[in-house]
Image (cartoon, grey):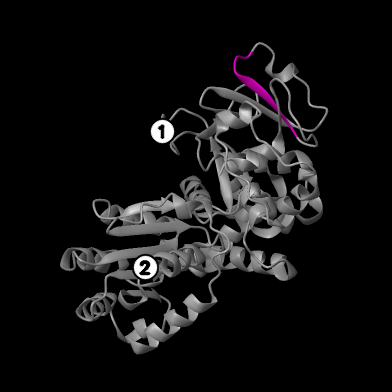
Amino acid sequence: MDRLQDRFSKLLQEVSTDFHRYMYHQINWNNRMIGLTGPRGVGKTMLILQYLKENLPRENSLYVTAEDFYFVEHRLLDLADLFVKQGGKHLFIDEIHRYKDWSKELKLMYDYHPELQIVFTGSSVLDIHKGVADLSRRASMYHMQGLSFREYLNMFHGYDFPAYSLDDILQLKVTIPAGFRPFQYFSDYLKQGYYPFPKNDYENLLLQIVNVSIESDIPQYAGMNVSTARKLKQLLAVIAKSVPFKPNISSLASVLNVSRNSVADYCLYIEEAGMIAQLRDDTGGIRGLGKVNKIYLDNTNLIYALGREGVEIGNVRETFFFNQLRVNQDVITSSVSDFKIDGYTFEVGGRKKGQKQIEGIDNAFVVKDDIEYGHGNVIPLWTFGFNY
């Protein structure tokens, strides 16, 4: 326990509180059990350490990571028992999915110690949701994505832009200070701005995230063998070369030498890990259950890291729009255009994109790259990066 406390104290000293992710203010920190999931590298650890440093008494709080060697010989439940006996009130557990039978022990900790607040973070791979199903009456769950364009500007360039609702963006209410030029920063964000990584080693860190997610996280928690993990990587490579990818399940099954059902499962695993995003139609009625119409890489940084010389600007624009909007909205495919959100239709393109595609469509907008200001139903693409 003393070793865990020492490591926690050192982390608190080192953590910066200059910038907070959007999720920091959305979590109800009064809940007894809180779970925060998300892809690797988006800043979950930093967020919970910031909250600990700024809001909780050090003497009755503890942060641990489930990857710590301490848990080779000790159980989480035993740690919680000892911590409570010593007056502990707030236990934060990072990388919970690294601990075997984590959901069972979290339930016991919750039931045995009503005076203890438990906050845990974990991977967004599918196995997390299997465990969370067991905690549905206990844990308040939150999911975090990478940096929005707004957050990138605030974090790396010292701005203090607020977030805007979709309606505010469509009504052209995004206001910018005199002298601000969004395209001074937009290109860099698209290539190296979605993850809060240091810029001097950005691409290497991103590729490490991809490899660990595909080769370790998914296979470990989905019970896959090594050969299946290779097929995941092969599938991601096929998608990366072809995005936006209109899935032909039979063709993919043939290329990967697996069943059709396996292809759909693999895509879902990779999506949960934050590597791809599947654009669905509205046939399912609720989020995530419609038929998949297109597959995109999850964010534009992955396009540049995985696509290399094959980057296509139209795909970059659509990926940015889809990525930024799906945090707060259900984004589905449109039968006449690119996307549909809450009754609004969107056609995404460059400066010369016209209105022909959406003629006669109510509540339709042309989203244009390479323009700073909008007018009427023409909205600048970069402003959708202020949605969260």
Residue at x-position 70% and y-position 66% = 202
| Quarter location, residue 285 | top left
> Which of the two discs, 2 and 1, sits closer to the camera?
2
Residue at x-position 45% and y-position 51% = 25
What residue is shown with label 2? Answer: 56
| Quarter location, residue 220 | bottom left
Residue at x-position 51% and y-position 66% = 46
Residue count near mark 2 (Cα–Cα under 10 Å), binned few <14, some 14–19, many ≥20: some
The x, y position of residue 206, in whole percent, is 65, 64
What residue is shown with label 1? Answer: 286
Asked whether residue 90 appears in the rendered view, the answer is yes
The x, y position of residue 29, in whole percent, is 35, 56
Question: Please, which residue is most extreme toward the bottom here?
Answer: 2
The magenta region covers 361-368
Q: Is residue 265 above or below residue 115?
A: above
* Magenta span contains residue 163: no
Give amino acid for label 1: Ile
Quadrant containing the C terminus is top right
Magenta residues, dominant SS class: strand
The x, y position of residue 93, in whole percent, is 37, 70
The x, y position of residue 173, in whole percent, is 64, 31
* Magenta span contains residue 363: yes
Number of labelled discs? 2
Horizontal side, residue 34 vs residue 266: left or right:
left
| Quarter location, residue 204 | bottom right
Distance from disc 2 to disc 1, alpha carbons, whole Å, reads: 38 Å
Whichever of labels 2 and 1 marks the residue nearer the N terminus, that label is 2
Quadrant containing the N terminus is bottom left
Horizontal side, residue 128 vs residue 211: left or right:
left
Residue count near mark 1 (Cα–Cα under 10 Å), binned few <14, some 14–19, many ≥20: few
Element under label 2? Answer: loop
Q: Is residue 321 above or below residue 97?
A: above
